[in-house]
Amino acid sequence: MNSQAPILIVGAGQAGVQIAESLRQEGFGGELLLIGEEPHPPYQRPPLSKKWLADGGSGSAVSLAIRGAEALARRRIELKLDARVAAVDRRAGELTFSNGERLRYGKLAFATGSLPRILPVPGAMLEGVLYLRGIADSRAIAEAIRRCAADQQRVVVIGGGFIGLEVAAGARKLGAEVTVIEGLERLMSRVTAQVVSEAFERVHRAHGVEFVFDAQVVELSGRGGRVELVRTADGREFPAGCVVVGIGVAPDDRIAAEAGVACDRGIIVDECSRTSDPVIAAAGDCTARRLPDGRLQRLESVQNAVEQGKSAAAALMGRSRPFHATPWFWSDQYDVKLQMAGLSHGYDQVVTRGDLHKPAFSAFYFRAGRLVAVDSLNRISDHMLAKRLLDHDLSPTVEQVTNPDFDLHGLVKQSA
Ligand code: FAD
């Protein structure tokens, strides 16, 4: 395949724009088209549940742009917006858009992102039940929160994960009363230790948020098609002016799967972002990455989209650029910044350093005596240190971490 044949990228988000720019950096000189179904040039999603929402969701879309249309044009990256790819014919090397238009490709990248999981209960699509993925969603949620604040109605958030908690913090800032309903026994329980969950619960409670734990939502109901009540399995009812659902996302692998590209809850890629089709790469939230031990790993983060995007561009140029960097992530809730380095699942010991109650501390996760992850709350230098330790496969001992006088930074310096 001629590497200068047109490359088409489906999905103009974080991963899509990275693939396009990295292709130019890798020396691709041919036609490059970035296709997005949304009306906006590529934009950052993280602020949509954080500052942008807490400021009322009325900021300009331009302030969220990853790269404006002009900057892309300078790199000869053509943007085709408001255009949904409906199908891929791999034998013909052709895309079909939802309006029937067709385009030929030489090589292709999927960067189609993910979609919010829909609450699987009656009433999940009533008016006033809101899901957060894009700019329009964040605007609608801010508007609904403001209405609740004005009418003294509660915002009910379903899901005590990152999105739910960030929305709860934004809603408090916008003046609404908030109830968070969580199915498990503590906040962010799939990704953090109890000590971190408890710190965030204290912070939210101090800001007036109410929590309901171990509660399964079984029905949303209302009048005139508009949500008014959230019912849980134990028979409790929670009046709601609006409901924001944050129960996770599912990879959007629909067109790839329909085209016969190997998928398993995500487009399966290797460490170089190559799919089962040699002329197709994929990056970002839409992928499931095959690990050396055969397991599939899904990460939904800006870092993953960027790094996989670079690998995908290299792969489309016939090069190998595996990505092994330590995963990192962040969340902002009120004035607490949570920064996470590494993946903590499977940990068997967690110890802390710092002040739990401020909060300004880090939780260090160990597996079989080795450091695997660190969550830092308002401890930016710990986070930077954690990334360096994990990047270099350096592990302090539990005793070193818990000794406030031990210089953990010294471990990195010694190894340099
Ligand atoms: P997206 O950015 O979702 O882009 C995919 C694009 O493809 C979308 O615009 C979609 O409309 C388009 N598309 C899909 N199918 C088609 C089609 N058939 N035709 C045309 N276009 C199509 N990550 C962090 O690291 N830190 C955070 O704090 C953080 N906060 C977040 C807060 C919110 C509210 C959200 C929604 C996400 C957050 N994330 C955060 C996750 C992060 O934004 C994503 O991991 C990242 O955007 C993934 O990039 P992507 O390019 O894979 O997907």
Image: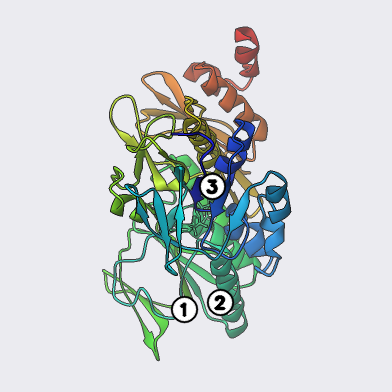
Amino acid on which the number 3 mark rests in the picture: Gly
Within-10-Å neighbours for mark 2: few <14, some 14–19, many 20+: many
Tell me if label 1 and label 2 are in contact, CB under 8 Å: yes
Looking at the rendered image, the disc whose residue lies closer to the viewer, 1 or 3, is 3
Whether the residue under disc 3 has CB within 8 Å of ligand 1: yes
Q: Residue at x 67, y 63 (%)?
A: 61
Kindly indicate the quadrant of the structure image that contains residue 97: bottom left
Q: Which residue is mark 1?
A: 128
Residues 202 and 197: in front is 197
Which amino acid type is marked by label 2?
Ala
Report which residue position mark 2 lands on.
144
Name the one closer to the observer, 404 or 384. 384
Q: Residues within 10 Å of mark 1 (few under 14, many from 20)?
A: many
For the point 44% across and 49% down, the residue is 188
Query: Going from the N terminus, do you reach mark 1 or mark 3 first?
Result: 3
In the structure shown, which secondary structural element does the residue marked by tag 2 occupy? helix
Residue named by callout 3: 16
